[in-house]
Amino acid sequence: AKGQIGENVCFYEPSMDESARARRKLASDLRQAIERNELELLYQPQCFIEGGKLSGYEALLRWHHPTRGLVSPVEFIPIAEEAGLILPIGEWVLRQACLEARRWDNDLRIAVNLSGIQLVQPDIAQTVTRVLLETGLTPRRLELEITETSIISDKARALHNLRQIKALGVAIAMDDFGTGYSSLDTLQSFPFDKIKIDKSFLLQSDSNAQAQAIIRAVLGLGQSLQIPVLAEGVETAGHLDLLVSEGCHEAQGYFLGRPGHAPSRLLAESSLSTG
Ligand code: C2E
Ligand code: CA
Ligand code: CA
Ligand code: CA
């Protein structure tokens, strides 16, 4: 219980202590999550705005915890990073995503999120090369999504590794654009193939003229730099209209499709049901 102030008792906050304990427990559970088959990738469609065709899918990680149920990556990815588990988990994600894309009967791209800790590993380009070879996926079908926050821990190393990865033919997208410390500086020093505008801008655009102005400005920036822009968080027809009228290149969001089960599984199911 809480000590009372003025009683010369240490101030004790059970909530902090409990959340630290909960994190330690999650970290130890996460250690076994791969072997126990508790991790799963969902796939969210990304679409070209002109013509409306699919351009690819983003792989999004889910953890089915044995007692807690579904745990959000927003919660467990930072724990995995802290506990030194992001390397095996990240490699598992990369391999599963490449294997999945390999099963599709098209040449759509698969986008995979890369943690900053993965990005600064001296052997990350070798890891990507090895996974591509092992899975047989053509490098140009792979895109790695990288946030600015993940670059800042060691910019020089991150840049070196990104160049090596790009030399393989793999594309690099800047994720969560607009939410970092100095997105513009990062944009000029890193060789990005795509900019993903963070979903917060589109989600606020209904009620907030500033958010709309920022979306316009980022689209203009992309045009000037000749980098295609994808907008995240398309939840309504109105969001899509805004992107169409502003000339955005690609879109992703619940209005276009929620993260879902592997497209190849759906393919298999539909061919089963049609006999
Ligand atoms: P992110 O990379 O920015 O991924 C987009 C997030 O927005 C996903 O959340 C997605 O489900 C959600 N989203 C998509 N469309 C909409 C929409 O229209 N409205 C709203 N409100 N949300 C939408 P999710 O799957 O919970 O992932 C959260 C974050 O966890 C990701 O953000 C990414 O930073 C991280 N993450 C997920 N999978 C991985 C992974 O395999 N590796 C690493 N390192 N991070 C991952
Ligand atoms: Ca992403
Ligand atoms: Ca985002
Ligand atoms: Ca994010």
Image: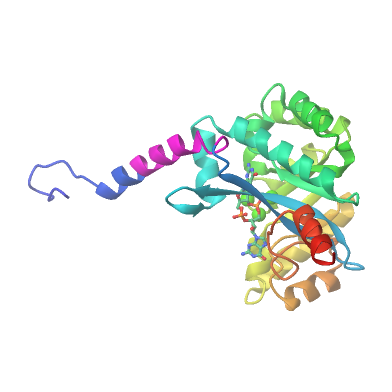
Residue 192 visible in the picture: no
Q: Nearer the viewer, residue 154 or 109?
A: 109
Q: Nearer the viewer, residue 148 or 96?
A: 96
Residue 22 visible in the picture: yes
Eyeballing the image, is 143 above or below 273?
Answer: above
Residue drawn at point x = 83 percent, y = 46 percent: 103
Q: Nearer the viewer, residue 65 or 132?
A: 65
**145 magenta-colored:** no
Quadrant of the image where one finds ligand 3: bottom right
| Residue 175 x, y percent position in the rendering | 71, 49
Please state the extent of the stretch shown in magenta in the rendering: 20-35
Q: Quadrant of residue 46?
A: bottom right
Is the magenta region chiefly helix, strand or loop?
Answer: helix
| Residue 115 x, y percent position in the rendering | 64, 38
**26 magenta-colored:** yes
| Residue 99 x, y percent position in the rendering | 78, 40
Q: Quadrant of residue 172?
A: top right
Residue drawn at point x = 71 percent, y = 70 percent: 212
Eyeballing the image, is 186 above or below 237?
Answer: above
Left or right: 183 in relation to 12: right
Residue drawn at point x = 69 percent, y = 56 percent: 261
Left or right: 233 in relation to 244: left
Work out which residue is located at the far front of the displayed protein and give it: 275
Residue drawn at point x = 80 percent, y = 69 percent: 243
Left or right: 246 in relation to 63: right
